[in-house]
Every structure is written in C-alpha cells, then in structure tokens.
Image (cartoon, helix red, strand yellow):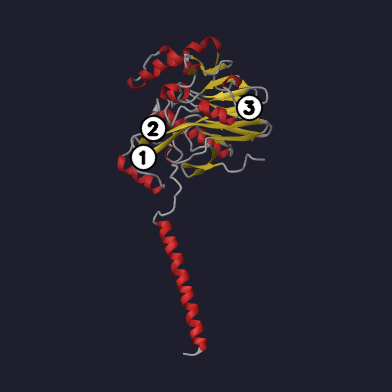
C-alpha cells in the first residue's frame, strides 16, 4: 500500500467514525435520552379585530363544541349515508363536527355595540361560555358596552346576559327583534325540544324588557347598523347590515350553521331551524344577495374568525374566508 492510499484510508476511517458517533447521538436523542418538549394540545385564535370604514369590529370566540354529525343535524331530509359521503368528499369527518360560537363587538366611534352574548355561565365549561374572559383579552370591559343586540333567543345567544345573578353588561341598553321577543314571551306553539329554551328566555331576557328597544326589519339600531329579515332559523331572527363610509358587511347570525353544509347545500334541512322551509328560503335569498353584491359577512357559526365572502357555484354557494382585505 502506498503512502497516498494509506492516507486516504485513514481519512475514510476518521469520517466513518465521526458519522457513526453523530448517528449515535441522534439515535439517542430520538430514543428519549434527552428531554423532550411536552405536547400542548390544540390551540385556536380567540380574538380578531379589523376595520370597516370608520367602524372597528372585534370578533370574539365564545367557544366551540364537538358534536356527533354532520347527520342528522344537517341533511335531515336526506339519507345519512349521502350526508356522510358528502362530508368525506369535502375533507370533513363523517362522524363528528365542530360548532364554533363567535360574538361580535362593533365600536362605531360613539357606541360600543355587542351582538349576542354567547353561552354564558349556565353552559360554561373549558370550551365555551368564555366571552367575559376573552373580552378582557380583546381590551374591553363589560361595563363599557353601550348596547346589547340579541339576534334571536336561542341559548347560545342569550346565555351571557347575566353573570353571578346580575346583568352581565350593567350599563347597556338592549335591542331585540320585535317578532322574536313576542314569540318567546307569548309561549304559544313552542315545540317540546324548545320548552327549556323558552323558560331560559323568560328568566334571562324578559327582565330587560323595560330597558329594551324592539325593532323590525329595516329599522336602525344606531346610524350605520340596520336590521334585516332573517326569519326561519327562529321565528323572528334578525341579521344586521353594517355600513360605514363606503364599506358594508352583513352579520347574519345563524343563517348558516356550517361553512360547507349550509352553503353548498342550502336546501338541506337543519335540526336547529324552527321552520325548515322558511329557513331554506331565507338562506338562499340572503346568500344570493351577499354573493351578488360581493358583501363580506360574519356568521356566528362560521370557522373563527368567522368573517368572509360568499361565491355562487351553480345552485349552491361557497364560503371564502377573509384574509387581509380589512387590514388597510
């Protein structure tokens, strides 16, 4: 063996030895001989603020719930297998769904207006009923709220009206849809599955009647915030159109309960809808309007931060989440 061959052999041995030592160190690390970072679990954004003309809008995630589904919550008028297959084709679980709750605060420059109050203390757990804590994260205090607007009387919208036996928003005036308030207060033709809901409404909403304003579609809460007929999901649910400067947006409450099922299949019946046929007609009408007008929207049960656009796709629609459109 020449001196050159011996030198090359020595170099190769050194390199192979170093590689083996490195592999041993890596192998030791992967096998847990060094400390590992803990698993921290799922983490979601909970507060999102953007501008709409002169308005400042803050969406706050009151929480989420995981339910079995999508059938029979969605597609009650269709076979379960069809609904599950549709979910899989749209990259969704066929046996579970996530239902978010998004509360909206609008600062008009003169008033701080809260739309709905979330699940509240009666339904509070680690995953929902978190509006109060997250308002603080957003930089607001309950006593700063000037007006509370209730879009409709379901528990996940009225549950946060009270806290520890006192009004949760002590300085606020209240706005209810006239038809919605009358329905729950009269208590006529309440379906069995909504009787507990009616009892809750009588307990937490009716006590505010003397401090409340009752409005109809077409009337204003304050300048730039107007009620829109969205009857069907509940007997008198109202959506709200925001206008500031040249900017517009529709807060549509529970017009849709899922970003795929309710938009791509607007004629599918939804378990939570009071009048299924009226809800379908209202859903198609409003989705067509916001799509044709290219008007951004906020949906209470859309994936957080719950603001986006609607596009037509034949006889159905598609949810397009907002990105940076409102950041300027």
Horizontal and vertical percent position of residue 288: 52, 37
Earlier in the chain: of badge 1 and badge 3, it is 1
From the top left corner, tell me how far across and down residue 236 is, in percent.
Answer: 47, 21
Residue for point 55% across, 32% down: 59
Q: Earlier in the sequence, mark 1 or mark 2?
A: 1
Asked whether, in this view, residue 10 is left or right of residue 32, the answer is: right
Crowd tier of the residue under label 1, counting other residues whose Cα lies within 10 Å: few below 14, some 14–19, many 20 or above:
some
* Residue at mark 1 to residue at mark 2: CA–CA distance: 16 Å
Observer-nearest residue: 126 or 171?
A: 126
On screen, residue 290 above or below 120: below
Tag of residue 96: 1
For the residue labelled by badge 1, is the local secondary structure a helix, a strand or a loop? strand
Is residue 215 at least partly visible in the picture? Answer: no
User: Which residue carries the number 3 mark?
Assistant: 107
Work out how far the residue at label 2 is from the one at label 3, CA to CA, in angstroms. Answer: 33 Å
Query: Mark 3, residues whose alpha carbon is within 10 Å: few (<14), some, or many (≥20)?
Result: some
Q: Residue at (45%, 72%) from the top-left corner?
A: 17
Numbered disc in front, either 2 or 3: 3
Q: Nearer the viewer, residue 168 or 71?
A: 168
Residue 7, position in %: x, y? 51, 83
Label 1 – label 3 distance at C-alpha: 36 Å
The residue tagged 2 is 270
């Amino acid at each position: 063996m020449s001196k050159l061959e011996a030198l090359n052999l020595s170099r190769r041995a050194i390199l192979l030895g170093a590689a083996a030592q490195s592999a041993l160190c890596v192998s030791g690390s992967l096998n847990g001989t060094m400390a590992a970072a803990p698993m921290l679990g799922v983490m979601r954004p909970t507060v999102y603020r953007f501008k709409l003309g002169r308005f400042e809008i803050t969406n706050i995630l009151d929480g989420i719930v995981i339910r079995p589904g999508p059938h029979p919550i969605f597609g009650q008028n269709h076979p379960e297998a069809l609904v599950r297959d549709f979910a899989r084709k749209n990259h969704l679980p066929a046996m579970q769904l996530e239902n978010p709750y998004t509360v909206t605060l609008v600062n008009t420059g003169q008033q701080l207006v809260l739309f709905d109050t979330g699940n509240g203390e009666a339904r509070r757990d680690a995953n929902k009923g978190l509006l109060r804590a997250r308002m603080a994260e957003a930089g607001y205090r309950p006593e700063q709220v000037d007006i509370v607007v209730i879009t409709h009387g379901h528990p996940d919208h009225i549950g946060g009206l009270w806290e520890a036996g006192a009004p949760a928003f002590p300085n606020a005036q209240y706005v209810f849809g006239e038809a919605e308030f009358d329905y729950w207060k009269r208590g006529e033709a309440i379906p069995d599955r909504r009787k507990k809901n009616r009892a809750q409404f009588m307990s937490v909403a009716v006590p505010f009647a003397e401090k409340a304003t009752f409005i109809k579609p077409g009337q204003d809460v304050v300048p730039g915030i107007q009620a829109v007929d969205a009857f069907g999901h509940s007997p008198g649910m109202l959506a709200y159109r925001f206008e500031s400067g040249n900017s517009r947006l529709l807060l549509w409450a529970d017009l849709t309960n899922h970003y795929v099922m309710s938009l791509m299949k607007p004629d599918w019946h939804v378990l939570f809808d009071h009048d299924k046929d009226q809800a379908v007609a209202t859903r198609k009408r409003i989705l067509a309007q916001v799509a044709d007008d290219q008007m951004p929207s906020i949906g209470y049960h859309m994936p957080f931060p719950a603001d986006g656009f609607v596009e037509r796709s034949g006889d159905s629609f598609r949810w397009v989440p907002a990105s940076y459109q409102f950041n300027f």
